[in-house]
Amino acid sequence: MMERLREGVNSIWVKVILGLIIFSFVFAGVGSYLAGGSQPAAAKINGTEISQNEFEQAYQNERNRMQSQLGDYFSTLLGDPEYVKQFRQSVLDRMINDVLIEQRATELGLRISDEHIRKTITSMPEFQRDGQFDNDSYTMLLRRSGFTPDQFAEYMRTDMLRTQFLTAIQGSDFALDSELTALRKLEAQQRVVRSLTLDLADFTKNATVTDEEAKAFYEQNPQMFTRPDQVKVAYIELSGEGLKDTLDVSDEDVKAYYEEHKDKYSSVEQRQVSHILVQGDNADAKAKAEALKAELDAGADFAELALSSSDDTYSGKDGGKLDWFERGVMDPAFEDAAFALANNGDISGVVKSSFGYHIIKLDAVKASQVKPFADVSAEIIVELREQQAAEHFYDMQTKLAETAFEMPDSLDDAAAVVNATVHTTDFISQTDAQGVLANPAVMQALFSAEVREDGLNSDVIEIAPEHVVVVRVDDSRDEMVLPFDDVSAKVKAQLASQKGELNAQAKADDLIAALRVGNTDALEAEGLSFGEEQTISRSGPDRMVSQVAFSLTKPTNDKSVYGMTRDAAGNVQIIALDKVIDVDVTKEAISSDFAKQVEQMNAQQDVAATLQALRDTAEVSYP
């Protein structure tokens, strides 16, 4: 219980389920996540399909994210087909959970307004510059991600809907004072223990292994003594890292780029307007809006009319005034009408939008302005260097690919063309490859028929942006069970280790059985004794000892209770629990952070239970 409590904040449910809007995921290129089409379905949930393309894109995004976090270690994990299978299933399960949450939220009538979406987007730090929403950043990031503004708004609506549903579950949890006190007392509890260690090395050393036993063990466990499929590899690695720092950009190039792309360094025209909203999509709503327009034409004060009559009560308190905006943010009909007004104070006619009927008054205009060359020259230099570096790397990559293809029997010519080094390895397998060779695409190429059997150079393989390799196999050898004579020493050592573990376990069982009935003669006969008493907490220095000690029942009548564990080296440890020390907990000792942690743990359990209930009642299939 205490471990779950301490780990609750870092739980995978809290991180994955409650953190749904992950912008690194959004901007990794998930534009096709919203795209439909007649694609095969990866899963179908109550009639809603997740297409195979959507799943593959989500899987690739998550894989890229994990690769950036874990590097070579994650590449090694991807070498295990079983891990890849589980990883792919976890991504699909998450997508199914998202659909189930969205469906349930819709059933409950939860909604996200367009205005809420607009305000969320304009407040996102990804789209801001100098603390203000920057339309250039907004359009650039959407373009890179493959989104249109409408698609991104719909993506945000879906994510915010899920978050709204989950937040409602979280907000319903609380912790009672009595519960917090009991949990804090359990967490603060201490235990007095002694420990005794049985050294595994002694049992292994004393284990006797005959030739017959070793031979039988070898024949029964051939997989333990099988040399895997292996290859000797030669490869060229080409990387653009640091390349841009070596390139010079002239002042003339910077100036010319600025003149050609002034629109890029210009702020867009922004407008501030006030509006009066009449919600509805019927004749009555239109008639009410036209009546309000007639009052304005007759001289009524716009701000007073907005306060008394606008259905947008939030802006109505401020005379109907809205935030500054530019084109591409508001409802198209509203936006067109607002930008058609010529002078400050001009009032539009009745405008129909998806929200209802509006009357719009122009308050102020910020004209488009070009940033001075001096303010953006440094930014242009960086961009030109990146462009030149990308072009230079592409040229080298093209030369590498062409030469490796034209001279397929060696990498020497290809290396000379790009001024690179041919690296070589000893025999490696798919499980012990290191660095770039551990990449699944590289492994697939190395063990393909063209490269391994025909002895050809591989195609250029992209490891990461501006990072490629070409590989070839210099030698190979098939998987085989090694001859017994070659591995007899290893067989005997393995068997001795297993026997040692079994003997140590058996000895520990005998000793604990004797100690539980008060017999200490066995300890004396073996020359063993417990160490000094230690008072430990749940988060003691030895996690395994603490885990066993706090799982044992409370001693009674001054009679110790015994348990067993293993240390980091595999040695058997016998734990004697002598005493439990309960600590009084005052109300002041229960902090608000602790209460929040308990509430979050409860929320985590509620979310898991909700998802399981949705799963149990849903029709989920995998076509």
Image (cartoon, rainbow, N blue to C red):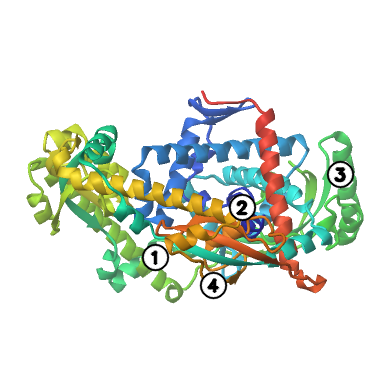
Of marks 1 and 2, which one's residue comes earlier in the chain? 2
* Residue type highlighted by circle 4: Glu
Is the N terminus in the top left, top right, bottom left or bottom right quadrant? bottom right
Please identify, in this view, whether the residue under mark 2 or under mark 4 is nearer the observer. Answer: 4
How packed mark 1 is, by other alpha carbons closer than 10 Å (few <14, some 14-19, many 20 or more), is: few
Vertical relation: 139 (above or below) 31: below
Of marks 1 and 4, which one's residue comes earlier in the chain? 1
Of marks 2 and 4, which one's residue comes earlier in the chain? 2
Q: Quadrant of residue 441?
A: top left
Of marks 3 and 4, which one's residue comes earlier in the chain? 3
Marks 1/3: CA distance? 48 Å
Of marks 1 and 3, which one's residue comes earlier in the chain? 1
The residue to which callout 2 is attached is: 19
Marks 2/3: CA distance? 45 Å
Please identify, in this view, whether the residue under mark 3 or under mark 4 is nearer the observer. Answer: 4
Q: In percent of the image, x 19 and y 41: which residue is there?
A: 230
Residue 108 at x, y percent in the picture: 78, 37
Residue 597 at x, y percent in the picture: 70, 60
Identify the secondary structure beneath mark 4: loop
The residue to which callout 3 is attached is: 290
Label for residue 532?
Answer: 4
